[in-house]
């Protein structure tokens, strides 16, 4: 088995180090280098892995379901609502005061952005019924 030794300045590498350009005419010839790192109590110190993936391994083969489309639509709508609400100066003061009031409560959101995601997500869910 090969061993990967990182430079002293790099503790871990996790994620895609190279990706496949799916639009390229040479996409079938390219490889994706994927590194993973996990922190778990094990007897082995070997917790980093590197995988090579080809185009077939990263291409989706199942159709997109209606639930996935609904989740994508919700994410898009809530994301746009959060961005608009964060820039709206007429409601900023009341939103920030409400955020501060709930921040230290059990289950309270710790960042203003997370609070806006919660509020806008709840509003979207109510509007969709």
Image (cartoon, rainbow, N blue to C red):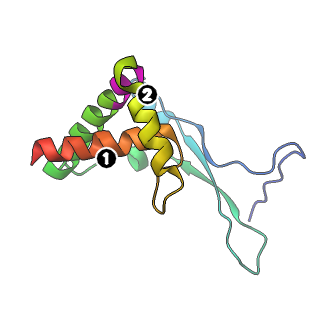
Q: Which residue lies most toward the bottom here?
A: 43
Q: Give the magenta part as a residue range.
A: 82-87
Q: From the viewer's side, name the closer residue of 69 and 76.
A: 76
Disc 2 target residue: 93
Residue 41 x/y as whole percent: 71, 77
Q: Position of residue 65 (x, y in %)?
A: 17, 50
What residue is rendered at 54% in x and 40% in y? 31
Badge 1 or badge 2: first in the primary sequence: 1
**Principal SS element in the magenta part?**
helix
**Element type at mark 1:** loop
Q: Is residue 59 visible?
A: no
Residue drawn 49% across the image and 58% down it? 105
Q: Residue furthest left?
A: 129
Q: At which x and y percent is residue 53?
A: 51, 48
Residue 92 located within the stretch drawn in magenta: no
Q: Nearer the viewer, residue 90 or 73?
A: 90
Which residue lies under the disc numbered 1?
60
- Residue 96 is situated, as x and y percent measured from the top left of the image, at 46, 34
Q: Residue 119: tell me if it is visible.
A: yes
Note whether 29 is above or below 44 in the view shown.
above
State which quarter of the image contains the N terminus. Answer: bottom right
Of circles 1 and 2, the one toward us is 2
Residue 15, above or below 45? above
Q: Which of 125 and 76 lies nearest the eye of the viewer?
A: 125
- Label 1, label 2: how many angstroms apart (C-alpha)? 45 Å
Q: Residue at x 87, y 42 (%)?
A: 9
Quarter residue 85 falls in: top left
Q: Residues within 10 Å of mark 2 (few under 14, many from 20)?
A: few
Q: How many marks?
A: 2
């Amino acid at each position: 088995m090969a061993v990967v030794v990182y430079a002293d300045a790099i503790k871990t590498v996790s994620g895609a180090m190279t990706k496949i350009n799916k639009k390229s005419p040479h996409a079938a010839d390219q490889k994706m280098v994927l590194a993973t790192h996990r922190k778990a109590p094990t007897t082995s110190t070997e917790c980093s892995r590197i995988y090579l993936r080809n185009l077939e391994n990263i291409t989706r083969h199942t159709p997109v379901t209606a639930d996935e489309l609904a989740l994508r639509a919700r994410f898009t709508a809530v994301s746009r609502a959060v961005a608009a609400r964060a820039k709206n100066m007429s409601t900023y003061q009341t939103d920030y005061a409400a955020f501060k009031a709930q921040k230290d409560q059990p289950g309270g959101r710790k960042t203003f952005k997370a609070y806006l995601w919660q509020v806008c997500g709840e509003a979207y869910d109510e509007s969709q019924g």
